[in-house]
Image (cartoon, rainbow, N blue to C red):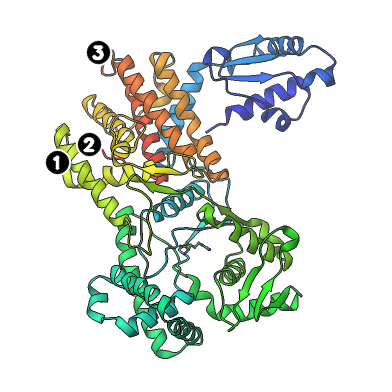
Amino acid sequence: MKDIKQELAAILGSALDMPAEEVYSLIEIPADSAMGDYAYPCFKLAKVMRKAPAMIAAELAEKIGGNAIFEKVENVNAYVNMFIDKESFTRMTLADIAATGDRFGRCTAGEGKTVIVEYSSPNIAKPFHIGHIRSTVIGNALYKLYDACGYNVVRINHLGDYGTQFGKMITAYRHWGNEEDVKREPIKTLLSYYVKFHQEADADPALDQEARETFYNLEHGAEEEMRLWKWFREESLKEFNRVYDMLDITFDSYNGESFYSDKMPAVIDEIREKGLLQVSEGAQIVDLSQWNMAPALITKSDGTSLYITRDIAAAIYRKQTYDFYKCIYVVASQQNLHFQQWFKVLELMGKDWYKDCIHVPFGLVSLEEGTMSTRNGRVVFLEDVLNKAVEKTAEIVKEKGVNTENIEETSKVVGIGAVIFNELSNSRIKDYVFNYDNVLNFDGETGPYVQYTHARAASVLKNGKAPEAFDVAAMDLSSICKGSAYELVKELYALPGVILEACEKNEPSVLTRHIVDIAQAFNKFYHDEHIIVENEEEKNAKLLLTAAAKQAIKNGLGILGIKAPEKM
Ligand code: ARG
């Protein structure tokens, strides 16, 4: 789609004898459309031109007003208010949506560049709980946003499948474990061993020593330890994959922390060679006090590696393997310091690409019932939350007597879509409280509301016997160049820009909110106007607009990882 703002920048730039890029960033979209579709403030020009801003605005309005792109140009004080010709704007927008279809909203900004999005990354043998929804769903939306903007994207699940806790787990299993129980219910069983280990170790410190030795053995490839670790990993992955299937999420790589175990010695050597490594109480650290940070612990006194060591090794491996443009880490804000520390170590190592490693943090999710605690077994499993959302949706759908042949399938698409939509509605950095009633409210700014709007558009198209394809260039669009129809056109036009903005800010909620705006604009149009009218020309124009709104909602939801049902 043509970027109107760019065109206006060119027109204003040539009138002012200024480069278009300089003009571009100043052009605004007024909140009140009575002040024009676009506005250009002239305050900054006053100094250079030695004239009152209002006078500059008046002259500028006069100068550009004749251009055919405008319906009219006015000046209000220091602002040039520009009204775009509605007919040609509407035709351009709807023709573009009709021509691009499922690709509407995508762009080529990232062509030739590879972005890694690392997300979800749960810990093996630990519950996949409601807290994990954040990284999983935000990460998936970011992957789709980068993909929509033309980047080549690699999705990595950096599984927490290594570290001293596996020494504890294996030790616990050897003392109290039972193969059958693990097979039947892997995560809950392994977790119970882990909890027991901590209880027993409080009284018997020898257990901790045994666990340390076990992890040392694992890190040195001991056969029995390796076998048990592999088995725990596989059983856990089976459970994780059930959730990923429900959410329709996949990864290109499950190379977790363990993948880097044989790559760490070289990295530790390099840190040492660069003179960064210091010995402190037997451990090896990188001192970061100059930057007001705690030291980065690179190896423990027994030589085993740490979480941070594996992150450094992983980043170096990824740079070598993928030559990424950006490597994005979708990880809770609780780990801010961790990322600051190891980004600094990379910088000190002279890896100037450390700047391309980006931590995308997010806030906490809590439940109304109170906080969770893995150690005390107070855990809310993500799988249970998704299942409950689907069940509750089925109840609502039945109650409403919703128009669908397949209640089961619809409830899945709507229930899970609702959870995802809710997750992506607020700025990611905000903490929020999960509440089923808010998530599943069909009338709020929710997933079900937007999906329902999509289904409503589908049913209008069906009832109006809309053609497969419209010949937009030949249609009379006068009936939709005004009022709420035109407001809808404007929202649709904005979608590609919003997608790019959400991608650049790593902030899916920018898109989520815009999809709500489109849905609300469509519903206003639907209530204000009769769509299926006698007059063929008018009916066709309105159906064209309906089809475009439906397409935009579908594409937007698709990028968030949500399906758009035809019936609901
Ligand atoms: N497994 C970690 C956790 O559950 C998250 C991993 C985040 N990614 C990273 N590269 N450190 O806390």
Q: CA distance from mark 2 to mark 1?
A: 9 Å
Above or below for 230 versus 349? below
Amino acid carrying mark 1 in the image: Glu
Provide the residue designation for mark 1. 405
Provide the residue designation for mark 3. 534
Q: How many marks?
A: 3
Q: Nearer the viewer, mark 3 or mark 1?
A: 1
Q: Is residue 563 among what the camera can see?
A: no
Mark found first going from the N terminus, 2 or 1: 1
Q: Secondary structure at mark 1?
A: loop
Q: Nearer the viewer, mark 2 or mark 3?
A: 2
Above or below for 337 versus 8? below
Q: Position of 93 compared to 542: left or right?
A: right
Amino acid carrying mark 2 in the image: Lys
* Disc ID at residue 567: 2
Give residue 459's position: percent from left, percent from top: 24, 30
Label 2 CA crowd tier, 10 Å (few <14, some 14–19, many 20+): some
What residue is rendered at 29% in x and 61% in y?
242
Give residue 156's position: percent from left, percent from top: 48, 63
Q: Secondary structure at mark 3?
A: loop
Give residue 379's position: percent from left, percent from top: 33, 58
What residue is rendered at 66% in x and 63% in y?
294
Tell me whether the residue at label 2 lies in contact with that at label 3, contact meaning CB atoms closer than 8 angstroms.
no
| In the foreground, 44 or 65 | 44
Give residue 288's position: percent from left, percent from top: 71, 64
